[in-house]
Image (cartoon, helix red, strand yellow):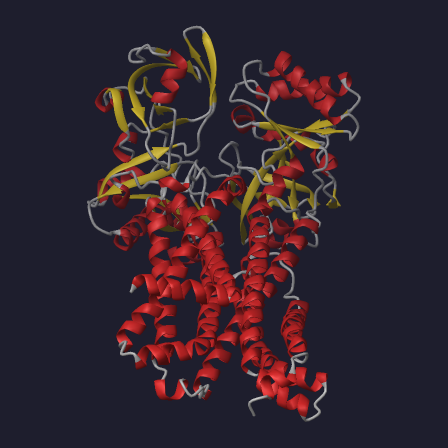
Amino acid sequence: MFQTWFKIFFRNQKKNWLNGVVNVSGLTLSLTVLMLVLLYLNEERKYNQENSGRNEIYRVVHSMSDGEIWGVSTSVEGPKYKDEIPEVIETYLSEGGYNPNLVYVEGKKYYTKKIITGEASFFDFFPFEILKGSIDKFKETSDNVAISETLAKRYFGSVSAIGKTLEFGNRVFIITTVFKIKGKHYFEPDLVTQFKEYPKEEGWGSYSYDLLVKTTKGNLTKSLENKMNELWYKNSTVPSAEKEGMTPVEWDKKHGTKILLEGLKDIRLEGYTKSASPEGKGNYKLIKILLSLAVLLLIISCVNFINLSISSAEQRAKEVGVKKTLGISKKSLFIQYTTEILLLGLISFIFSLILVELILPYYNLFLKKDIILINEKGIIFETFIVNIQLSLIVGFITAFKLAGFKPSEVLKGNITRSKKGLIIRNMMLGLQFVISGFFLIASLVVYKQVNYMMEKDLGFSGDNILIVKLGHGQNNYQNYLIAKKELVKQNSNIIEVTSNFFVPNGNNSSSTNAIYKENDVQTNINPIDFNYFDILKIDILKGRKLQERFASDTITNILINEKMAKGLGIYNDPIDKKIHIPVPYIKGDRIFNVVGMVKDYHIYGLDREIPPIAFFHWSVFKLMRDHSFYNFQIKIKNENMEETINFIRKYWKLNIEQDYPFDYQFLDEKYQKTFKNHQKQKTLLTILTLIVIIISLLGLFALATLTIQQRLKEIAIRKALGASTKEIMFQLMKVFLKIAIYATLILIPFSFYIIQEKWLNDFVYRVEMPLYPYIMTPIILTILICFVVGIKAYLATKINLIKYLKFE
């Protein structure tokens, strides 16, 4: 019996090869896209899954009054939470990011990037496998250090690292613990060190650290947040309000801070902040978009499958009639035809696996991942189950149609197409049109927005400006001053050298409240050199820039940007206004005089607002200058750029940092990284749009072929009665054009809402919703429908009349 089934199956596939190609190719491409998206999602979800305490560990973040959420905390919070909240059983305070440094080992120097410094409780939060030594030994003193297995082999080879000493950051450490990291984690350090002493209490407003809390079992998020906010109100809001002569309610409204908790298990993808950890943050929005589009692609493929299967079912009506006459049960027929669809689904699944394996190297390169398909058996199984479910749905619908034919009717050749069946088919065609149109409109709008971002005036020029990173040495500023003079003298291709703290799209930032009369603005402080605005071509709108000839420009004079001036209510007349800026690095009354206002420029990407910024000279921030001077910028000429960079590299090795790697990046390229996620969305959406349109057109072509074949006798009669080719073509195309018109009425409002509310509104700086995609898309798709259906309709008008009328 099965042998007969397979013979019939292959004969029918050979006969209706176009249907088979469309069905298998559509489902193959859909499953391929789905599998690729699931592989990406699974790769991101692997973070922290190896941590046994992931359900009880949270990061403390702060929601500020201006709506921003900071991932940093104060040094005073952790002990307070642990002492006064019973559910908090342990805390871990750290410097947050990694601190690369030169590590001295047995007379050799090693540049080591992943060094983390924090409390001794690190391994209580990250229970990595301990290969040698012990956690208890590590906790005994802050002079002990834990080292990763990989780094231990690099430093000491096959010799045991336990008991050996390391030196960096003016400290000597003894190795007491060797650990091994399995999986992906919030921290993946090579060296774990402890604070020499716990950071001094700088108050409840000094956000400088990463704070993790470990709780008792159970989902305690909301309860903990409430208790932490109560402590914050008591210890921060009330005292601050009293100090400023305000009520706590007034203070909370103006400067209120709310504590939020990010679960370790979700922080990579669903955290509140822009940065999830030193290991980066996953692009959950992109994943959700891709997953949604993959589902839409599957729907289109299934619509094709169902439409073509039902339409071609009528060609097998006599087969059903004969089988029923011979006594084959309806159940047996149902199983047979469902099995045929399942077999097509299985073929599609196998092809999709092959296609994923072929695409994966390029996909990994595009996403900067290292996914290996054979290691992702769970994803393969999930996709297989989805494929089986979809095949069963399509199979049941088709088998129900076929098994329902009456032998007495079909053997006479009386096959009627029900009005209900035609309506359902047309609705599914309309759904295809809506989905295809949505993809095309979305692709055009994304293209418009990304181009707008790429072409928008950023307010500064980053052309030919190198950002050169410095190590964590104590003489960085002095080295910079020497390099600033010598580089320009020694190479005519070097135009000028400058520096600032708050580099566009950089990781450094420091902010505080700036106060003028009753106005108060959260402001970023940005130490700069005198020539900074000239090199980046940032416009001074009012007043003047900082100048070396004025001693006060290195003590009390500042510049502010437009956003800060507006916030303080001094935009029209900012010059010589006295602003109170309680900068923690400066002693005294901290009153500064405004000597200039600069034009706003985009320090972040266009999905974030330009922040208020106050510009000081480095000399005002001596502590910050001596301990947080990590980069400077070099403007070079277009000519002989490679030679110029090589010259700077050699100078660097000889005069600045012999043992640190020469690490540089062009400023414009660094800023372009803010657009990368959106460029990826554009690229992926364009590819998916092409796939969707191709699948839809193939399905339309196959369906038009079947539909027109069913009307060949009607066409022959019309021709015999004198109908012209144009009249016959219009009659054949009319149904498809009506579907396109009705679908357009749904497509336009649906697409506008989704794109405007769910994507475009995420950008602070964006294009106005363009109208041309909503006009062009229905026209383009209608033209394609006319072209595809028109070809088949035209060929149908050339049929042999005698062949179809000889029995009438």
> On the rendered structure, is 172 left or right of 132?
right
> Is 769 drawn above or below residue 452 in the view shown?
below
Residue reaching furthest top? Answer: 107
Q: Who's the residue at 37% across and 16% down the image?
A: 153
Report the number of numbered marks. Answer: 0
Q: Nearer the viewer, residue 549 or 765?
A: 765
In the rendered image, is residue 101 in sight?
A: yes
In the rendered image, is residue 254 in sight?
A: no
Rendering coords of residue 683 (x, y %):
59, 51
Residue 737 occupies quadrant: bottom right
Rendering coords of residue 60 (x, y %):
35, 44
Rendering coords of residue 13 (x, y %):
46, 64
Q: Who's the residue at 36% across and 69% down the image?
A: 395
Q: Who's the residue at 41% across and 61% down the image?
A: 344
Q: Nearer the viewer, residue 154 or 399?
A: 399
Q: Nearer the viewer, residue 643 or 411?
A: 411
Q: Who's the residue at 73% across and 21% down the image?
A: 643
> Is 66 drawn above or below residue 744 in the view shown?
above
Residue 735 occupies quadrant: bottom right
Rendering coords of residue 708 (x, y %):
58, 79
In which quadrant is the N terminus drawn?
A: bottom left
In which quadrant is the C terminus drawn?
A: bottom right
> On the rendered structure, is 129 left or right of 27?
left
> Is 689 drawn above or below residue 100 in the view shown?
below
